[in-house]
Amino acid sequence: MNKLIPFWSILKKDMKNYYLKPPNISWGIIFPIAWTLMFFIRSETAVNIRSILPGVMALSVLFGTTSMLAVTITFERRSRSFERLLLAPISLNLLMLAKTTGAIIFGVINAFIPVIFASFLTDLSNINWIAAFLSVLLIAVTSTFLGLFIAVSVSEVFEAQTFSNFFRFPMMFLCGLFIPIPNLPVVLQPLSFLLPLTYGADILKTAINQTGFIPPWISFLVLLAFSLFLFLMSTRNIQKKWIY
Amino acid sequence: MSSTIIEVNRLSKYFGNLKAVDEISFSVNKGEIFGFLGPNGAGKTTTINMLTGLARPSSGSIYIAGEDGIKNIKKVQQLIGIVPDESNLYDEMSGLENLIFCASLYGLDKQKSEKRAKQLLAQFGLDNTGKRPFKAYSKGMKRKLTIAAGIIHQPQILFLDEPTTGIDVESARQIRQLLQELNHQGTTIFLTTHYIEEAERLCHRIGFIVKGKIVRIGQLSELMQDAQKDNIVEFTLETYCTELQNALATEFPETNVTKAEGEKIRISSPERIELMPFMKFFAQNQVPVYEARVIRPSLEDVFVKITGIELSEMKKEREGRKK
């Protein structure tokens, strides 16, 4: 059997059916656009816009991807159509990759919304776009798998959104995007290094403003490790909870 | 109908300390419709979930079309079709899109999927509604489309969990007809139901499951024979009276004479009942007889006898399911 057929088919269905569901529009599209505009309008100089760009990009990815999985998985669980996918002759890993690829693409696109806004307001030269793209991609992969982990742990869409915020908001303030990690209270600093967004944001800072402080290769490795851990935990939870 | 296509041995499923399925063993022959009958909570759905890969057995073995149904479940899933007890297709997608999507899950390319989907829509009488979203379908139409989705990849075996529960009489009749057609085309059908009359109409063999245990498996005729200890003949008379019943009992002491509903009398005997002496008796006593009928047990009688569950309990359950 050609595994690409079900993979592409699941991905296409999710993009068509769920990407414009209200929870996705509010958390995944409107929210990132709103804070992009809010930060950019509040910033008085072009330098400020460029300095906050990594943070806004990282948060756009985080909110977009985690919302997506909360919708695609929990909607289908509630209507029992997810059972149909579990009963198909495709491996659980392939199924989960198909379910998450759409969210990853959505997250990457979301990340470049602030870039488009910024391009009208400031000079975006001397940016390492390859590193920026790779970091956006890795943030998208990690936060998608975080979204998957959350979606697998709950049964309703609203629970998924609430549970997502439990991770998203602390991450916003502890990952060094708006408050540099050395400026955080000493007790909170170790916590920052337990958050995947810290590493993604640091690569973005290096790529855009050369202000990151963790060697990029370490951040890439840590993000890959987070992704793998969250993916394996999610598939393990699915096998435990849904193939009972 | 001789080679075995499903072989289940000492299959059990525990939920904590609760034994939902208790060491059941049975086999299903290729090309037959096998009915799995039992009240709610008997273990029917858990069994079907274990056979299809949605639940992991606690112990025992499953072989489907020669494949190990526990170790090689993904291989088995390619050979089987599953119709769950609830229609679980995608609300936002049309009937046609749903079928094409389901076909793609089994690796069918777009061209083949579309051709097969259109063919099934026509076969199931849904060709005029193929472009309508699934959420706009009636319950009966949803059920039909869910069955069509279950056979989109032309499986060898179709598992159906309560296929006609909660739908109108006409749709249920059409679905039963479709299942018979499918079976005639060679598909083996494993059906769980708590509608006894449905099992009676459709199934070649039936297994009764109660509290997680299989209490009896057999062909319909065998089960009927077991349930019928006595031969019974029922006479419909112009008027019934106790004197006539007593006179019959005196005249035919080797039989048991009872009153049936309305103006009817039932004669039962462990031996075959010859009609002529009774007809002579009625003629001599100038009792007009309008009908003489041999009474055979229904599957409901068999069910009650085998499971000890009263029909009233089954009816209550049925009503509950409909709601």
Image (cartoon, coloured by chain):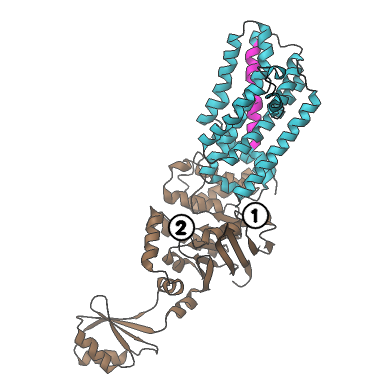
| Residue A7 against residue A138 in the figure, above or below | below
Residue A142, image x, y percentages: 69, 32
* Label 2 residue SS: helix
Q: Tell which subunit mark 2 falls on.
A: B
Residue drawn at (26%, 93%), measured in percent from left and top?
A: B250
Image quarter hosting the N terminus of chain B? bottom right
Report if residue A111 lies within the magenta region: yes
Residue drawn at (50%, 29%), measured in percent from left and top?
A: A22
* Residue underneath mark 2: B175
Q: Tell which subunit mark 1 falls on.
A: B
Q: In screen coordinates, is A225 left or right of B130?
A: right
Report if residue B117 lies within the magenta region: no
* Residue underneath mark 1: B78
For the record, the magenta segment spans A100-119
Using the rendered image of the protein, determine whether residue B114 is visible from the camera's viewpoint.
no
| Tint applied to chain A in the drawing | cyan
| Residue B242 against residue A60 in the figure, above or below | below
